[in-house]
Image (cartoon, coloured by chain):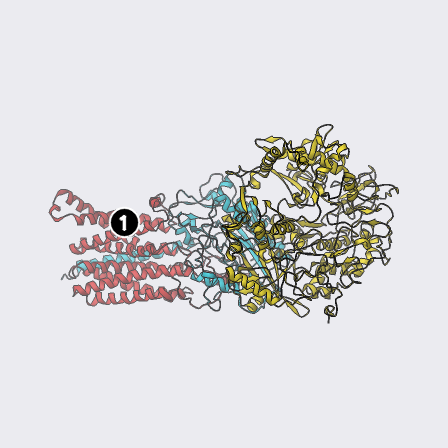
Amino acid sequence: MTATDRTPPPPVDLARRNGYFDPPPRMGFFTDTSVCIGCKACEVACKEWNHVPEDGLDLLGMSMDNTGMLGANSWRHVAFVEQRRPGTAGPEEQTLAVEARLRAAPRGGSELGTTPLPTAPGGAVADLGMPTVGRPGDGTGAETRTDFRWLMESDVCKHCTEAGCLDVCPTGALFRTEFGTVVVQQDICNGCGYCVSGCPYGVIDRRPHDGRAQKCTLCYDRLKGGLTPACAKACPTESIQFGPLDELRERADRRLAELHGQGVAEAELYGRDPDDGVGGHGSLFLLLDVPEVYGLPPAPVVPTRSAPQIWRRVGAAAAAFALAGIGAFASAAFGDHP
Amino acid sequence: MTGDRPPGPDAPSYYGRPVLKTPVWEWKIAAYLFTGGLAAGTAVVAAGADLVRAPRLRRGCWLGSFAALLASVGLLVGDLGRPERFHHMLRVAKPTSPMSVGTWILTAFGPGVGAAAVSELVPARWRSSWPARLLRGLARALGLASAATAPGVATYTAALLSQTAVPGWHEVREELPFLFAGSAAASGGGFGMLTAPPAEARPARVFAAAGAGGELLASRLMERRMGLIREVYEHGTVARRRRASEVLTAAGLAGTVLLAGRSRAGAAASGIALLTGSALQRFGVFEAGVESTRDPRYTVVPQRERLDAARRGSAVGDDVGRPAR
Amino acid sequence: MGSNMAEAHPVGFQWVMEAKKNGARVVHVDPRFTRTSALADQYVRIRAGTDIAFLGGVVHHVLSNDLDFREYVAAYTNAAFLVNEGFADTEDLDGLFSGYDPATGSYDTTTWDYEGASQRVTAPMETGMGGPPIEGAAGGIAQDPTLQHPRCVFQVLKRHFSRYTPEMVERVCGVPREQFLQVCDDWTANSGRERTAALIYSVGWTQHTVGAQNIRAGAIVQLLLGNIGRPGGGIYALRGHANIQGSTDIPTLFDLLPGYLPMPRAGQADLTAYLDRVRARNQKGYWEEADAYLVSLLKEYFGDAATADNDFGFGWLPRINGDHGTYRTTMDMIDGRVFGYLVMGQNPAVGSANGRLQRLALANLDWLVVRDLTMIETASFWKDAPEVETGEIAPERCRTEVFFLPAAAHTEKAGSFTQTQRMVQWREKGAEPVGDQRSDLWFFHQLWRRVRERVADSTDPRDEPLQRLAWDYRTEGDEPDPQDVLRRINGIDLTTGRTVDGFTDLRSDGTTACGCWQYSGVYKDEVNQAARRKPHDQQGPYDPEWGWTWPANRRLLYNRASADLDGRPWSERKELVWWDPDQGRWTGHDVPDFPLTTPPGFDPPADARGPAALRGDDPFTMQADGKGWLFAPTGVVDGPLPTHYEPHESPVRNPLYRQQSNPTRRVYPRPENPYDPSPPEGDPDVFPFVLTASRLTEHHTAGGMSRQLPHLAELQPELTVEVSPELARLRGLTHLGWAHVVTARAAVEARVYVTDRMAPLRLDGQVVHQVWMPFHWGPTGLVTGDSFNDLLGVVADANVLIQESKVATCDVRPGRRPRGAELTAFLERLRSRAGITSATGTTLLTAGRSPTNPPPREAP
């Protein structure tokens, strides 16, 4: 993906389109995973500032990751991927053990970041034999790598240009801020849960006992006060950068070119392209492997894009339904009475 | 709902962890898919019965519709994380949200059904009083209006499910409205057959038969067009429910055509088969969606295929992620 | 090396990442692939405890290929000095230097002298920071500027490391030859006039029986490559906590007074006797002025009561007569010689080596006061120690009366932190402490008040120091104002009542008072210099107005070495300070670390002493000879040069010498402290693996500050043991399953992590498996687990008495550990199988004991 080859499209003034008069520039994150040291300061800073509760004292076995996923109670999540030296034989012990536990969980492991997995007694997990998903090391670049590799990535809400969660929210609780970010108004949300399924990234979730949908607000309150979001502020290595999106895109392009120049051919930008399935992210990522390896969807499309097609089919089906009804009674009215 | 994992192609993943969140909706939403469809289907039958003067069919179906509606509202509110805030649904009308659209359709649909049902409940000795006559007239008009919105009630739920990132629902978006319309009609007609004598229930039988036929057809078509998501539909609980639904619907259809006109018992049995078939279909589809989010493969593989295809097709690959239309 | 900077010092690691972005090459040498390795350009796996062999290999590579920065080495180090004729190297004595006394397990270091100067035998820290004294160092030390004389330090060094070849490094460390040479190439290519390289280590490097020598080895490489005293160079000692530097500068150590002045010893009757011991006659450098530092300290302690007539109260200072370190004290508790214990900011029950020993000691006290943020294991050991389970401690019979006092956190009080660059930074109070929690200042102030009342009328001479102590800080409410404490540390000119400008203002005549001479200047001009926060974009590259760095706000020590012999920067790229001939003084981006007006070519008169005796090319101003020490003629008790010794517990026979382990290490033969004997004394059958430990980013040391906090506890909720896939197969361990790690002392259970970050090493046919654990767990908190430190024995480096906690031998077995009495029996069984008694492993000398002790196998 060579995003730099193209002339950038004219910037979409997202906030203006959403009715803001003279809005500030669209703000976002650029998460450069090539300098992430996996310290999880972002996770902690986020939770402290936003009063996000603990999501389970649960040893997951996903390398150093004991959070597992973004969720209602984890608005930043640092993924750790251990990639075996190419050509090493034998099963991937971590994936084997972890996957077995995930399969047995009520939500298949997608409850991570919101609630803990059920406790496996004594850590014993059912052996499912061979793994049914690929090993993390099976991503790209394995051909050229010669050694063990450990990837770390701090994941966060993508603040999509076309946000699936926002589109499907029936109460207007989810809204587009003047900074172009997507935020849940906690006094409006009634916990219908539609956004959870509307998000193609598995970011937003409903908080148990609270009942409302929760996700990264890009520290809306801090932005209002002219401050940097807590995670970016806490990040020691500038893996998480915050700023006007236009600027971040340029920075991301420069960094990508730099890494490509250093021979890191597998580096790619994720969410950079305004022509992608969600109109580009408000939070960009520089990844060192394909998105799947980090648990990210490779090319998601906002479900809203299918809405015209869906409603056309719904209309046709409704018409058929109505016709069947009319037909049934017309046949009764005009047919022979018993 | 763990289910045994169907075999299939491997994709890189994060320790096999899902990419998506499984829907937080519980069984209540699956049940609502059924009760909502039933309310819509019976409302059509009731309104038609009113027009063709089939009073027992009318009465049974308005009451059935109302009961189904009340159940629907109860299920919907009950599934909310903050049930006391259910009225926040009425803050906005949002065309991009099928749930908002559905809320307003239900809002349009509900009063007529309610009025009609209340009118049906007026004791016989008061029926000739003028308020009862006024109510009757009003109920009739409102009931007809409700029936006019019933097709929306019966089918919007397909949009509700399909306009999500859930592969099991999104991938079947073309057929799901027809499946749900058929299912609603089958259940509505089936209910009519259950409550009215065969003599009065002929339109209900026709409606039910059309619905059942449509449902079976849509279901088959859906399966034929499925990609990778077929694995979910053809395995485990989902497959068992949908197979049972098909058998019951087909049996109900046969019974409707062959028996229901002649025997009350046959009509009742056919009606029950159709109703059960409809309910099982809804639960099957609902659970297929949930299952499809538990495995990253259903999210990742189709996207990766589309991405690779786009890259092959374009030198710079700037069409990455553009939806396949 | 010896540092997991990204995990243990993530905030500091941002600068490494910035350097990397600017093109620096980052190499990480560690037993385990860590988050630091993940970000490094090259990762080198090394066997724990073999750093000296690796660095010795680098020295060998540098010297045998003439890659040293010769101009720098010849002028600024002691390379040219000649060593006494009587000196014998480890090459001559199979792993011993001359002067070893098997009876005491220590060296008589007289044969290590320079020719022409004499030093005195000194105990560690006996002479403080100033570098050990050398009689006549300002006079004539014999030298050969051509570095050819067989007895010159340069040649001695060359000989000493002559067998540390890449092949030997591979055999000892398990580092493949190509990997090792790559590191050598990177290091040497990035050193010299135009470039400098930095060496980073953390406290883990010190936690070896060769701890001090590890750092010496790093220093030798850096001196040879000209990387000391120059921008971008140096050796970074990353500390274990935010203010550990501060707590050694103004120490909580038994053998030091503030400013690295040694604690008086028993028998030092008066000030003169003390100063004669601290300084040598006729030596160079600033340590010559130690009298001014000590007298000013006494004036600060005792105020007007300190006069020239009473030796400024020198007699009131406590005396030491041996080892009073934490481990010695702990053992004395068990032996009934210590009755009370005040524990602050420490959690020995789970945080110190040999946890069982620690807890048995705590259980044998009359009283114990614990001040901490939360109820830690040291305060609750009497009810939740593992020994309660085994029946060794019975809560209802435990005699120790425990007082727990809640303490305020660092965010709840103002004060200063001194970080690893010696920078003092002031921090304000962020929040009021909750409930009964109080600051340390409050505690000591109140303690002082009460103690003072008790001793007010005492006539016991023991109480005199307390009665005379001048405790007159300005108070705010019921506690001293921390700014005033800092002001007193800075020092006051008693004639004017104003703060002094720096340590050169301090006098030995009692006209100045100063709490710590190094910190003089931190309150210059009555302003808290540590509180300065001028942003980087408003000042020069070295940010002199951000905080304050001791000494004298100097950002880089020994920075005279950044200029060449003529006082010009070695290169434009690497300029820092230089001689300005027009002004006749040193100037530059940093505060010059040199007498300001001493010109580069200065040759002092024969009778000069102290700073005035420094030659123009003597950049190491605290050293008695003004030079960087490749060879340490004195001050390091286990040898003038670092030598590879195997760890105290090791499954490997020392391939270099018949002397297996450090012959001066401190062993403590006790029933509570058994050791697994290493070859040649014992075989590694029962405990065949190498155990090492370190921190996780997510927790803080023994966990008292992190296991109680949900947002940290959830990030690492359980004790784990990391093993390689190979070891997992060997021992039948499964990822996330249970295992117990066993040593001669204890068994600790943990969840298994099977990871490629661990890998076995191949040394000359022998496969060595390494096992890693974090040490943050204990029985209290939101997340609990066995304590790693229970596995360790107490054996220490003779220089600084730091325990060897980074390496031991162990076994890993699948499943949970036995409980209660079964555990005791299980350990007893293993010990008897391995033949372990309280005496095993305590024989220090293994050199030259043939035929039972065959020489190490030659390389094939």
Query: In this orientation, which residue lies closer to the viewer: C505 or C281?
Result: C281
Residue C440 sits above or below residue C773 on the image:
above
Q: Which three-letter amino acid code belongs to the residue tagged 1?
A: Phe
**Relative vertical location of residue B324 with respect to residue C120 in this rendering, above or below:** below
How many circles with numbers are drawn on the protein?
A: 1
Q: Colour of chain C?
A: yellow
Q: Nearer the viewer, residue A68 or C806?
A: C806
Q: Is residue A154 left or right of residue C222?
A: left
**Residue sitting farthest toward the top:** C496
Instruction: Name the spot of residue C449 as percent of width and height, x first.
Output: 60, 33
Q: Where B100 sits versus B15, above or below?
A: above
Q: Quadrant of the N terminus of chain C?
A: bottom right
Q: Nearer the viewer, residue C242 or A253?
A: C242
Residue extending farthest to the bottom is C860
Residue C230, position as x, y percentages in the image: 75, 48
**Residue C163 visible in the shown view:** yes
- Report which residue position mark 1 lands on: B109
Q: What is chain B's hue in the picture?
A: red
Chain in cyan, by letter, is A
In what quadrant of the picture does the C terminus of chain C appear? bottom right
- In the rendered structure, the answer to whether residue C100 lies left or right of residue C342 reads right
Look at the image and tell me whether residue A266 can be seen: no
Image x and y of residue A78, in percent: 53, 53
Residue B23 position by quadrant: bottom left
| Quadrant housing residue B270 | bottom left
Estimate how packed mark 1 is, as few (under 14), some (14 to 19) or many (20 or more) residues with alpha carbons within 10 Å: many
Chain of the residue where label 1 is placed in the rendered structure: B
At mark 1, the secondary structure is helix
Q: Residue furthest right?
A: C606
Q: Is residue A77 left or right of residue C163?
A: left
Residue B50 drawn at (x, y percent): 18, 53
